[in-house]
Image: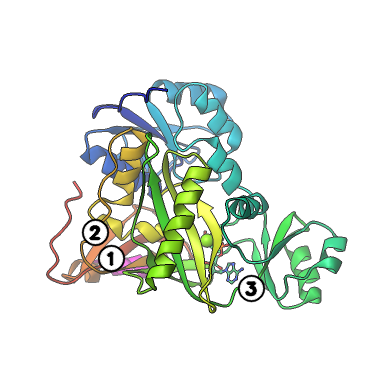
Amino acid sequence: MALPPPLPPGSTIGILGGGQLGRMTALAAARLGYRCVVYSPEAHAIGGDVAVAHVQADYGDMAALARFAAQVDVITYEFENVPEATVEACQRHKPVRPGVRAIHVAQHRLREKAFFRELGLATADYQAIASEADIAAATALPGILKTCTEGYDGKGQVRVADRAALAAGWAALGRRGCILEALVDFTAETSVIVARGLDGETRCFPIGRNDHRDGILRTTMVPSGLPAATVATAERYGIALARGLDLVGLVALELFVARDGSVLANEMAPRPHNSGHWTLDACATSQFEQLVRAVCGLPLGPTDMLFPSRMENLIGHEADDWLRYLADPAARLHLYGKTSARPGRKMGHVTFVPAAAPSRSTT
Ligand code: ATP
Ligand code: MG
């Protein structure tokens, strides 16, 4: 089947979701001469601040979705908890890239783990916890109990040392459908971000080393310093996943490097990923530009690391130090324009690069 022609500059990209990932995508799109329209339910969407329009409506509002689709040439999403029905409705009007399949898998932790295994990706031992009987039969202990749906930034998770803690944890999570994952004794966390174009070409970004605190990503360091064999496995896993989902766009796969050297798939996100923010300042193509290229059917960009970097998230009031970062020649500051710095909220990030490093042009 012939490929659809590339969408030329001047075309409009619709983005489902109003957060920082969509915002940075819209900025990258603008640089290449594309326009973005953001669709999200909030009155103020930080993605909408840098787009040509913000359609403010619920994800279930079919008339608003149709109006949105009529204004755009292609649709993408910046977070994976957009309801499947919303994506399906959009697909009836315009191409949605990545499609509904990636959302379907990513929205449910059990489905996601089973899908990884089907593709030959190793994971921690896991089991479904949906009843007292499941608790009695559980073997993946000590472990982490996670709700199957709606978790992010470590929310909806409890560490459980033994069966009694598992029972208490399940009650604390509201006896919802959960997954129990064996606790991985990891030496490092990393993630691979893979772009896949309309023609099926795949490109991986260099992998970084991710450090989390309280379930939230704090820093990503690139290069990761991980052995070549680990990098190769990460890339093989990422490419298998992008192909397995048949996606056009980006997928990020979070990975554990276990003490025995094995690489285990944790979870995926079919969108730009926080661990790829360093690419804005230290990579030949940013992950956001790569997403724009993929969804518009353009050639994918080179993913060479330009220089080493360390990305730090600015969480809550950490972003109040903006003046200090601006005064630091090694710091590249990105603020998301969020109005209230609630604890745990990602307000921006800063990427530290070698002091003499040239600036990547972002506008
Ligand atoms: P995020 O949105 O930040 O990716 P999340 O809420 O989707 O987080 P996970 O990625 O599953 O949750 O877990 C958050 C962090 O908790 C992981 O990055 C890791 O540090 C730790 N963690 C999760 N699962 C395990 C596990 N099975 N063994 C050891 N640590 C784990
Ligand atoms: Mg995660």
- Residue at the disc numbered 3: 183
Mark 3 sits near ligand 1, with its Cβ under 8 Å away? yes
- Residue at the disc numbered 1: 351
- Percent of width and height locating residue 273: 42, 54
Going from N to C along the chain, the mark reached first, 2 or 3, is 3
Q: Specify the quarter for ligand 1.
A: bottom right
- Percent of width and height locating residue 60: 59, 31
On the rendered structure, is 353 left or right of 145? left
- Residue at the disc numbered 2: 281
Q: Are marks 2 and 3 in contact (CB under 8 Å)?
A: no
Task: Say which element carries label 1.
Answer: strand
Give the class, few, some or many, for how many residues have Cα within 10 Å of label 1's Cα (few <14, many ≥20): many
Task: Say which element carries label 2.
Answer: helix
Separation of marks 1 and 3 at Cα, in angstroms:
31 Å
Q: Label 3 is placed on what type of residue?
A: Leu
Going from N to C along the chain, the mark reached first, 1 or 3, is 3
Q: Label 1 is placed on what type of residue?
A: Thr
- Percent of width and height locating residue 216: 49, 66
Q: Is residue 61 above or below residue 299?
A: above
Whether residue 252 can be seen here? no
- Percent of width and height locating residue 39: 44, 34
In the image, the segment drawn in magenta is: 316-322
Give the class, few, some or many, for how many residues have Cα within 10 Å of label 3's Cα (few <14, many ≥20): some
Q: How is the image coloured?
A: rainbow
Task: Say whether residue 319 is magenta.
Answer: yes
